Amino acid sequence: MSTPPFHQEARRIGELQRTQQQDEFRRALRALLMRPLMSPEHADFPAVRRQAERLREWFAREAGWPLHVDREGARLFKRPADLSDPTRGLPGYDRRRYVLLCLACAVLERADPQITLKLLGDRIMQQATDPALAARGFTFTLRTASERRELVAVCRTLLEHGVLERVAGEEANFVHESSWQHSDALYDVHRRLLAGMLAAVRGPSTWRTEDAPLDTESRLQSLVAELRVDSEQGHRDALRHHLARQLLDDPVLYTASLKADAQAYFINQRGTMAGRLCEAAGLVAEQRAEGLALVDENGQLTDVAMPAEGTEAHATLLVAEYLAQRLRQTGEPTLITEAEVADFLRNAVGRYGRYWRKSARAPGAERELAGLTLDRLHRLSLIVRDTDGLHPLPAIARFSLGQTEVRARNSDTLSLLESLT
């Protein structure tokens, strides 16, 4: 008996709807990985709201990350597996700027629904007089252009995350010595997103002074300490969540970096785990004897793209090939000094310098360029750095330069395109 035409059409429509639902789920999941604190103005927020229940279940099961979604925004409490990883954080932020960000959030928590840039700066100055901050050498006065620039950078971070919404004015003139006294901006404060800035299990204000942890490591651990079931299954769930967080958040997971129990679990389960994570997030697994990487082929989920355009990106690719060759020659990680990398880049100027910016070709510029390239490689988990130098890690062997192709864009400009093998 043949299937009636309307049944075939209904089946086709059903399959199309399931495909569309899966595509939307994947898009929403990827968007939350890139922007864990999401305002309603984000392009993917409607998809996140529609897929909220399924996303909550997936993140809780695979990574142990809670997800809260309502009409005012979404917050994926995306806690890293390694709290001490120095490669994480907001671009351009150091310890001082993070202090300013925390002070700004504290001010906004007590502020009216609207606040001006000047008023925010004045109240941060008041907060900065706290004896505990002064004892650590922290001051903030707004008297210098660098301090005002820091305040503007913090405001733009809060604008980017939807905590502030500009109503009038502009921040740019606030930095300049001649105009800052007469420049201002007005913001709406979105408290729902402000409350989600800290991805902690327990807020620091809940600790009594006499019970609060004393050192930085203990404080970090106390903020994210999660309740775990004291059973065999609870232990396996904790291991799975820890590994999934690394795979979703880090460029590569090396088996040797894991503790014994996590290493045994990973060796047995990494294929299954990779399959689930890749199917949901649209990633591709690269499994090697040394570990596992989940690769985003279009680079959307990558904080540090490689290869990419620009002098630093091109130099990074050249240094990666140089270090990969050194690793292949020795067959095991070997110590390489930053001076050796700088020497390599100085010698590369003759061949590739015409494609680099002028300042990178100046005598002595190779030292700064070496530092920038090694920082990128460190953030990609392709090298490990210590006080004596650096060690290339196994994943760097995947970067090998192919044949250089030079294409003319016009009569005056040439672009160098590097291919990966």
Image (cartoon, rainbow, N blue to C red):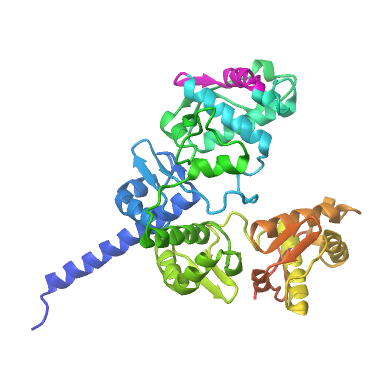
Q: Please identify the quadrant where the N terminus is shown.
A: bottom left
Asked if residue 221 is positioned above or below residue 145 in the image, the reply reads below
Residue that sits furthest to the left in the current view: 1
Q: Please identify the quadrant where the C terminus is shown.
A: bottom right
Residue 414 visible in this rendered orientation of the protein: no
Magenta segment includes 171: no
Residue occupying image coordinates x 53% and y 34%: 159
Q: Nearer the viewer, residue 87 or 90?
A: 87
| Residue 416, quarter of the rendered image | bottom right
Task: Give the left or right position of residue 157, taking residue 32 as reference.
Answer: right
Asked if residue 325 is positioned above or below residue 296 in the image, the reply reads below
Task: Give the left or right position of residue 20, taking residue 420 as reference.
Answer: left
Task: Give the left or right position of residue 318, taking residue 276 as reference.
Answer: right
Q: Position of residue 93 (x, y in %)?
A: 65, 40
Q: Nearer the viewer, residue 146 or 289?
A: 289
Magenta segment includes 113: yes
Q: What predominant SS class does the magenta segment belong to?
A: helix
Task: Give the left or right position of residue 70, taking residue 352 as reference.
Answer: left
**What range is drawn magenta here?**
112-131
Q: Position of residue 317 (x, y in %)?
A: 71, 65
Residue occupying image coordinates x 85% and y 56%: 366
| Residue 196, quarter of the rendered image | top left
